[in-house]
Image (spheres, rainbow, N blue to C red):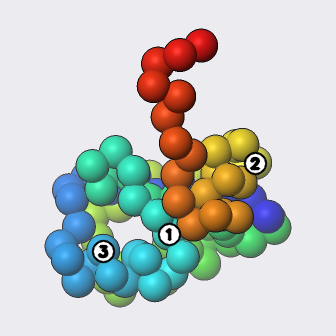
Amino acid sequence: NKQITIALNTPPSADQCQQLTAQGLFPGDGGLTWSGSAGTDYGSAVVWHEKLQSTGLEIAEIRLQEPSLEAVFLHLTGRPPISNGGLE
């Protein structure tokens, strides 16, 4: 599956956050970006756009890409990876 990232112009309301979470998306960047698993092809961006229009969100951008290692971890565990505390 592709990873979808949705960038918003304004932070979502509590109700909109619940709607995004119900769609299987996770917040990032102070709630201005939401990411999750999308379909297997780029046509799924249109489907996501149609789903999100009804929420009243101000969508700046919808991106589909191959999932990053962090996205795979989030998908498998339901939580973001723990920071290494700045240790390299």
- Give the amino acid type for the residue marked by disc 2 in the picture: Glu
- Give the amino acid type for the residue marked by disc 1 in the picture: Leu
Pointer 2: what residue? 66
The disc, 2 or 1, on the residue closer to the chain's N-terminal end is 1
Q: Secondary structure at mark 3?
A: helix
Left or right position of 72 against 51? right
Q: Image quadrant for the N terminus?
A: bottom right
Pointer 1: what residue? 25
Residue 2 in which image quadrant: bottom right
Front position in the image: 78 or 28: 78
Left or right position of 31 against 80? left
Q: Secondary structure at mark 2?
A: loop
Rendered view: 1 above or below 68: below
Mark-to-mark CA distance, 2 and 3: 24 Å
- Tell me the tag on residue 81: none
Mark-to-mark CA distance, 1 and 3: 9 Å
Which residue is outermost to the top?
88
Left or right position of 43 against 9? right
Q: Residues within 10 Å of mark 2 (few under 14, many from 20)?
A: few
Mark-to-mark CA distance, 2 and 1: 16 Å
The disc, 1 or 3, on the residue closer to the chain's N-terminal end is 3
Residue found at x 43% / y 77%: 21
Pointer 3: what residue? 17
Where is residue 65? Give x, y as percent.
Answer: 70, 48
| Viewer-side label of 2, 1 | 1
- The reply to whether residue 81 is visible in this rendering is yes
| Viewer-side label of 2, 3 | 3
Residue found at x 53% / y 16%: 87
